[in-house]
Image (cartoon, helix red, strand yellow):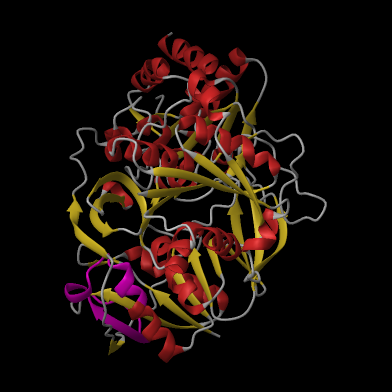
Amino acid sequence: MKTLLIAECREGRFLDTNYELFGFAEKLGAESAMVLVGRQDDLPAFSGKLYLADAAKYGEYNPDLHKKLILAAVEQEKPDYIVFGHTSYGWDLAPRVAAALKAPQLSEVVGVADGAFELPSCNMKMRRTVKPNGAPAVLTLQGGAFPVLKPGGTPQVQPLEAAGESGVNFLGYEPAVAKDVNLTKAEVIVSAGRGIGKPENVPTIAALAKALGGELGASRPVVDGGWVDHAHQVGTTGQTVNPKLYIACGISGAIQHLAGMKKSGFIVAINKDKDAPIGEVADVLVVADVMQFVPALTAKLAK
Amino acid sequence: MKILVCIKQVPDMESRFKPDSAGGWYSDTDLAFRMNEYDEYAVEQAVQLKEQLGGEPEVVVLSVGPDRVVEALKKALAMGCDRAVQVQDPAAHLKDPWQIASAIAGYAKGENFDLIFTGLQSQDRGSAQVGVTLAEILGFSSVTTIVGFEYADGTATVRRELEGGLKARVQLKTPALVTCQLGLNVPRYPTLPNIMKAKKKEILTLPMADLLHEEARSATVSFYPPPKRSGGIVLEGDVALQVDQLLDILRDKTTVLR
């Protein structure tokens, strides 16, 4: 069995998360080759075949040309599986490759099951096992679902070229807005989610954070809604944190949020939904109305 | 100018999900359905663009599914879309993303749309495939995960959200498709007058069989709750008691209260 792993390069660097692709290939018991649109001076540590295209020439986001580069590597490699991370790069590019190959695509794989794959659904409350009809199949892997594996060694580089027009023109990156709140150094973070009900309830959550000597965090929906500034956002598109204590208030636990906080030392979740996915990572799940429980906890701490 | 918005109707994600009798998807019984959250941003962006261009563009909203999806279409019409298309299929949940995209393309290819808006993904299946696949079939340029959208003279300039707070500025010419991320805009609530106005708008019903001529490329084997992680403590009951129990645990297991 053969996998073609599609690596991702960001601002000139080979991303460490690419090594999860090797973790997946090992779980599958497959041989691997890798495709990278990246830089000659930052190559992955593995001794297999690396199809390398120059990011200076093809850009870091140029889906039309990256698709062609990957198709050229597929042509040579004839893999059983073409594997991406389920990231902004992978979910953008994978369906283009699948459409060109008339291949099945399975998104956000979290497990392997005898020729089939386990995929999350319904905000991770449920799972599906799905079998691709035929090979090659295109897969995207959920971040963190497979272990980081650094095979070590030096790759055999095979240059990759493609020609053609691109309908999508990358103008440049906008840097992340400077954070005046550094959650990464906080020992305690108390985060507000949509379950707190309304923006007027944010101070109640902030009061608990203060009582514990910690910082206020937030999930994406309350940031998008303008209830809390983006500087407080925890998750893949915010900050990744690992405080000694993380208290999630009314946060259901979307994967993007869990990825940003699951390495916390001790996790408490307060949620009225006993089946909320946040329960999967919580050391303690308090099943309660967050706006009843939090003020009661803050009051007790003040005594 | 002609704009298409593709929306899906999904269950409230706070529901309890049970497998249906076939064991491949959830049972509809006892579930409350609503418009997929990502798609609300897609509808809003299309309507904002129509307003920006003085009302000239026609905005068509499309959904695939059983007759209950008409409720989601009516909401989109009340938000400002001009007319609706239901691709009628009581068995839409058995189709894979390739088939759904193919069916939508079957409708869209004769309609000469300039711009298509979809959500980044659905909340229930979450494949994030249908939008991009539709663009590939139609030969449109496409960009996913947009959190900013501007349009002028046949060119869309968008902001793509990447990991870690980084964003990319990207330009693409029509015909184009974009998939919308949460936070792109602030989706409006339909007002009562607009809900009344929407009742007069056309909802066209097209049978799935007329649009879909493709086989599935993947098959669902089973649908089940994930294995529960053991070890987590669950506190239920009286709030005052829960507070005391939690404080005891925190004193025992962490150093933050010392």
The N terminus of chain A sits in image quarter: bottom right
Q: Bounds of the magenta span?
A: A42-67
Spot occupied by residue A275 in the image (x, y as percentages of width and height)? 64, 37
Spot occupied by residue B102 in the image (x, y as percentages of width and height)? 56, 64
In this orientation, which residue lies closer to the viewer: A64 or B231? A64
Q: Residue A152: name its quadrant.
A: bottom left
| Point 49% across, 24% down: residue | B194
Instruction: Based on the picture, tell me whether residue A52 belongs to the magenta stretch.
Output: yes
The C terminus of chain A sits in image quarter: top left
- In the image, taking residue A93 as reference, residue B253 lies left or right, namely right
- Regarding residue B34, the answer to whether it shows in the image is no
- Regarding residue B29, the answer to whether it shows in the image is yes
- In the image, taking residue A150 as reference, residue A3 lies left or right, namely right
Q: Is residue B173 above or below residue B232?
A: below
In this orientation, which residue lies closer to the viewer: A61 or A211? A61
In this orientation, which residue lies closer to the viewer: B45 or A103? B45
Q: Is residue B194 above or below residue B110?
A: above
Spot occupied by residue A98 in the image (x, y as percentages of width and height)? 49, 72
Spot occupied by residue A57 in the image (x, y as percentages of width and height)? 18, 76
| Point 21% across, 73% down: residue | A55
Instruction: Based on the picture, tell me whether residue B192 belongs to the magenta stretch.
Output: no
- In the image, taking residue B37 as reference, residue B1 lies left or right, namely left
Q: Residue A73: name its quadrant.
A: bottom left
Q: Is residue A208 above or below residue A48?
A: above
- In the image, taking residue B3 as reference, residue B124 lies left or right, namely right
Q: Is residue A219 above or below residue A148?
A: above
